Image (cartoon, helix red, strand yellow):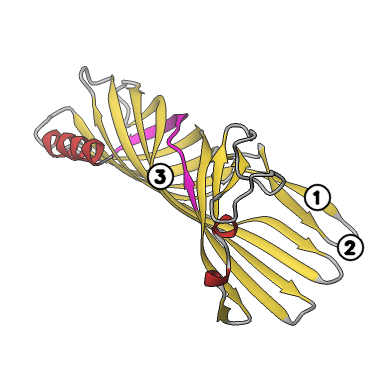
Amino acid sequence: MPKIIIIILTIFVCSITEAQSLIKFGITYTIGKEQSLLGKKKDKNHETNVNSSYGGGLTIDLGYIYLNNNNFGPEATLSFFLGKPKTIEHIIDNEIDNLTIVNRKMLFFSPALFVVGSSTNDVNPYISSGLLFNLWGNITKTEYVTKNETEKAEKTWKVTLNKGIGYKSKLGILYATNENLLFFGELQYQMIALAYKRDYLINYVVNGADKLSTLTISEKEIEYQIAITHDSNYSLSNKFDINKPLNSVMQYANYNHFGVSGGLFWKP
């Protein structure tokens, strides 16, 4: 990842000297595209699935575009995503209230082809389409459990994801106020599903007391596998070892979204 960032920064610096370069800064509000089963909500009278995406939130975009013939060229964009807290499960029965919330921050990189219309007007349409890669993530899953309204426990998991490849497309309009500054508005669609890699329990508190040290390794770590075999470490196995991470079948977190973006292009 450091090499990728260095290359991007080098392109960014060199772009200042290019007459046909554009620097893009934008803010995007995204709505998660419903697709995956994330969990369920259940009380005494109702039970519903939580079918959604982790893609809803706010994104800050920084991009570079080189128009080699003033109409189309390569685009490279870094997107810092701050996800809206997502309730994936809420189970209420006679004795237990269990609430699970996921928080996430992500950094994505998107190389794309940028095409802009040409006219004598101040307003021009454009389209951008390309790949999407996840470079970094800070994801936590917190479980709040209340038993008999007296015992309150809180568990916080650090969630790690594998690297993946997705797709991103944008359709927008440019408005030129002068030769060097252009405002834009765009609609965008993103599609990417990332496989879970490992979960670490980093916090476990019961009625204000730290209980993390009382748990075994299998209770504090989860490793995801494509398939559970006889060599896997799971609770029903005869070889189950509490001093090793628990193995679980592979799951995927989708970050699909629809978004509305606004900002400006600067031509150095």
The answer to whether 44 appears left or right of 237 in the picture is right
The answer to whether 187 appears left or right of 93 in the picture is left
How far apart are labels 2 and 3 at the CA level? 44 Å
User: What stretch of residues is rendered in magenta?
Assistant: 159-177
Q: Residues within 10 Å of mark 2 (few under 14, many from 20)?
A: few
- SS type, badge 1: strand
Which residue is at 72% across, 73% downward?
Answer: 146
Residue 44: which numbered mark, if any?
A: 2
Q: Residues within 10 Å of mark 1 (few under 14, many from 20)?
A: few
How far apart are labels 1 and 2 at the CA level? 12 Å
Q: Please, what is the dominant secondary structure of the magenta stretch?
A: strand
**Foreground tag (1 vs 3):** 1
66 up-or-down from 217: above or below: above
Residue 171 visible at all: yes
Residue 28: which numbered mark, if any?
A: none
- SS type, badge 2: loop
State the image quarter where residue 252 is shown: top right
Look at mark 1 in the image and give the residue it sits on: 48
Residue 81 visible at all: no
Report the amino acid beneath label 2.
Lys
Contact (Cβ within 8 Å) of mark 2 with mark 3: no
**Foreground tag (2 vs 3):** 2
Q: Nearer the viewer, residue 28 or 219?
A: 219
Quarter of the image containing the C terminus? top left
Look at mark 3 in the image and give the residue it sits on: 262
Q: Residues within 10 Å of mark 3 (few under 14, many from 20)?
A: some
166 inside magenta stretch: yes
